[in-house]
Image (cartoon, helix red, strand yellow):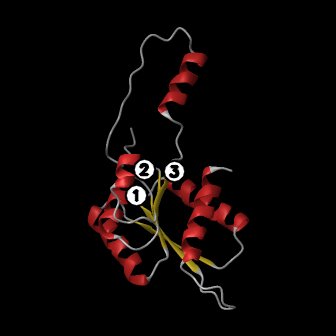
Amino acid sequence: MNTYSKTIALSLMLASAGLSYAADVKPVTIGIVVPLEHRAMREIVNGFKQQLAEKYHGKVNVIVKNAEHDPMLEKTIISQFKAQGVDIIEPIGTDAFEMTLSSVRNKPVIDIAAELTEHQRQQLKNPAVTDVIDETSAVKQLSFMVKAMPHLKKISLIHSADNKIFAE
């Protein structure tokens, strides 16, 4: 099962746990917080929607809001999702995830592309939180590099804690 399938299955499981199964089941509403406009963000959202349509045939309303790399707008979007009664909030990236955790205590939160350590998980005040990592682990990346380039002597890593993408 791929990452998006796992996300969808978990999202719907968490949301449906709080819903009744009457004939007129209200649609599950999923709010996705996109930190900034970027091709990778669109791919994440489109992949999620595609897998959702393939794997779940119930009523679902997906709301996608772009924070335009503005922390105040990101906070406003999260507050709007809470006020609108969104069933599941899915922030993309570490900053959006941490901001969501700081203000959402009683709704399922599924972070996408943000790392949540076991220690951090144990300290959460909201038990309905999980994460989906869509990246290859560092160990697997290094193993691949060694196999692909066995004579490699040096590796340079460039890291930024910022989600902002530069054109360079």
Question: At numbered mark 2, what does the secondary structure look like: helix, strand or loop?
Answer: loop
Mark 2 to mark 3 CA distance (whole Å): 14 Å
Where is mark 2, residue-wise?
Answer: 114
Residue 54: x %, y % from top left? 72, 64
Q: Are discs 2 and 3 less than 8 Å apart at CB?
A: no
- At x 43%, y 72%, the residue is 107
N-term mark: 2 or 3: 3
Query: Identity of the amino acid at label 2?
Result: Ala
- At x 42%, y 19%, the residue is 155
Which picture quadrant has residue 34?
Answer: bottom left
Which of 119 and 88 lies nearest the eye of the viewer?
119
Query: Identity of the amino acid at label 3?
Result: Ala
N-term mark: 1 or 2: 1
- Give the numbered dot on residue 40: 3
How many labels were placed on the picture? 3
Residue 73: x %, y % from top left? 31, 68
Mark 1 to mark 2 CA distance (whole Å): 15 Å
Mark 1 to mark 3 CA distance (whole Å): 10 Å
Question: At numbered mark 1, what does the secondary structure look like: helix, strand or loop?
Answer: loop
Question: Disc 2 or disc 3, which is closer to the eye?
Answer: 2
Where is mark 1, residue-wise?
Answer: 36
Query: Identity of the amino acid at label 1?
Result: Leu
Question: At numbered mark 3, what does the secondary structure look like: helix, strand or loop?
Answer: helix
